[in-house]
Image (spheres, grey):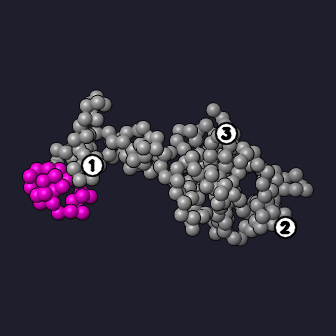
Amino acid sequence: MASADGHRVINLLECPACHQTMVPPVFLCESGHNVCSRCRGQRPNCPYCDSRVTENRNRLAETFAEKLPYSCVNQNVGCRQKFLLRDLAFHEAACPHRLYCCVPCRPRCKWRGRKFQILEHMKDEHKELVWVKAYNSLVYDNFDHKTDYICTHILSAYREMFWCHSKRDAKQGKLFEVIQYIGRKEKAAEFEYEFEFYSKGNNRTAIFRNKVHSEDDVENIYESGDCLVLDLSMLKYFVTEKKQLFYNFKVEKVL
């Protein structure tokens, strides 16, 4: 179906009450007018003719709805992609134009905003969690392999942004590090990250390199092991008497 024809057909699926494009289930009033499920739940009568809305469904309209491309809910803020209903929810959950929440390690922060607003929010409210260079020399203070620790930083480099997740799991005896690109999934493949842990005084060094992930659920990445995973029993040889763990961290563009 040509895009112009598809656009005309999908306009016919506009609900007469809320003027939104209807998705299944689509109900009929006694006079045969369509009403979306949301409006049916809010009012008993048809907004077009005031007759009673029945439990009868417009199966033809529902069939059209399932076969037509729908615009993303974020179209007004820049998303131009369209999807079949079966794929739309999956896209909208990962759309780079969607509303973002604040970082997981700040559950009390109720901020929500667009991608271009994230860095400004972090600098204003959580500046201690902001890194602004592709290469950083850092230190874990109070590093204790017997206690849990979770933290997420944001990195601004190459005019892009990345979530930097760190999780120390004492029960598993593991340290996890995951770097995620904030934006389109395919762009994540353009970057890699590297951690270099070093021990002052005895020249002990450990270097780990991995690909940057897209914005998948970080807990699933931890569980998959497709990230930097270190044994805490090994890392304790890098920790100083003051419980400091020194390391260098960088993100590089590889494509």
* N-terminal-most mark, 1 or 3: 1
Q: Are marks 2 and 3 in contact (CB under 8 Å)?
A: no
- Which amino acid type is marked by label 2? Lys
Q: Which residue is mark 3?
A: 158
* Whether residue 245 is situated above or below residue 68 in the rendered picture: below
Q: CA distance from mark 1 to mark 2?
A: 64 Å
- Where, by quadrant of the figure, is residue 193 drawn? top right
Magenta span of residues: 27-52
- Which amino acid type is marked by label 3? Tyr
Residue 206 location, x and y as percent?
Answer: 77, 50
* Whether residue 149 is situated above or below residue 4 in the rendered picture: below
- Where, by quadrant of the figure, is residue 174 drawn? bottom right
Q: Which residue is mark 1?
A: 19
Q: CA distance from mark 1 to mark 3?
A: 42 Å
- Which amino acid type is marked by label 1? His
Left or right: residue 241 compared with residue 33: right
* N-terminal-most mark, 1 or 2: 1
